[in-house]
């Protein structure tokens, strides 16, 4: 009688530990995103007919390849410089339209891919997201 009871207890303990193990493995899985923490803040005085305007953009990168995201973090100063130059070069008319923002997002992806290809030989970044886009 003790042996069947022990077997049942063992099975129950194993069943109770399964969801816990699944939760732990989900937490340890790496995220496919890398958020650039510092926002890009651009003074739009020249691009907005001498009206004081500011553009602030927060950027996140997506790749299912953790090596790409690690490379982006390693070469972050070069990526930030390239994006800052791109954002500064935009016209006020461009960034106020949805089509202009989508084009800017695509150009940002191309710029970052270019930096990564030059520095690492791997340009497999999948997407760039603007997680904050504020124009004042």
Image (cartoon, rainbow, N blue to C red):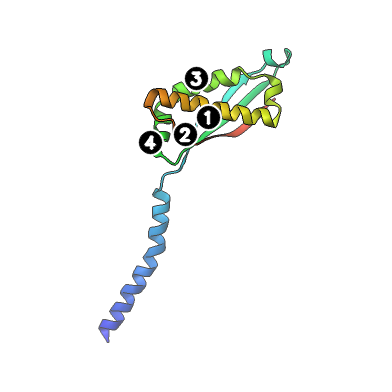
Q: Residue at x 40, y 58 (%)?
A: 22
For mark 1, what is the residue? 109
**Residue furthest bottom in the image:** 1
Q: Nearer the viewer, residue 8 or 95?
A: 95
Gap in angstroms between the C-alphas marked 3 and 4: 21 Å
Q: Which label belongs to residue 67?
A: 4
**Where is the C terminus found, in terms of image quarters?**
top right
Helix, strand or loop under label 2: loop
Q: Give x and y (percent) for residue 108.
A: 55, 27
- Return the residue at label 2: 125
Which tag, 3 or 4, sits closer to the chain's start?
A: 4
Does residue 99 sit above or below 45 in this rendering?
below
Query: Is 124 above or below relative to 50?
Result: below
Among the two numbered marks 3 and 2 on one chain, the one whose residue lies closer to the N terminus: 3
Q: Earlier in the sequence, mark 2 or mark 4?
A: 4
Q: Quadrant of residue 41?
A: top right
Q: Residue at x 53, y 23 (%)?
A: 83
Total number of numbered labels? 4
The residue depicted at 39 percent of the width and 68 percent of the height is 16
Instruction: Single out the mark in the foreground, 3 or 2.
Output: 2
Instruction: State the separation of the CA atoms marked 1 and 3.
Output: 14 Å
User: Which quadrant, please, contains the N terminus?
Assistant: bottom left
Residue at (68%, 15%) from the top-left corner? 47
Percent across and percent down for residue 69 are 42, 35
Residue linked to disc 3: 81
Label 4 Cα neighbours within 10 Å, binned few <14 / some 14-19 / many ≥20 = few
């Amino acid at each position: 009688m003790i042996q069947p009871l022990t077997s049942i207890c063992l099975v129950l303990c194993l069943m109770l530990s399964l969801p816990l193990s699944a939760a732990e493995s989900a937490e340890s899985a790496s995220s496919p995103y890398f958020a650039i923490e510092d926002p890009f803040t651009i003074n739009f005085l020249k691009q907005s007919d001498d009206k004081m305007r500011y553009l602030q953009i927060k950027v996140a990168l997506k790749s299912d390849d953790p090596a790409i995201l690690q490379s982006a973090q390693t070469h972050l100063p070069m990526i930030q410089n390239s994006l800052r130059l791109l954002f500064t070069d935009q016209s006020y008319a461009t960034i106020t339209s949805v089509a202009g923002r989508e084009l800017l997002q695509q150009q940002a992806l191309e710029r970052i891919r270019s930096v990564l290809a030059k520095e690492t030989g791997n340009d497999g970044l999948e997407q760039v997201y603007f997680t904050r886009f504020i124009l004042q």
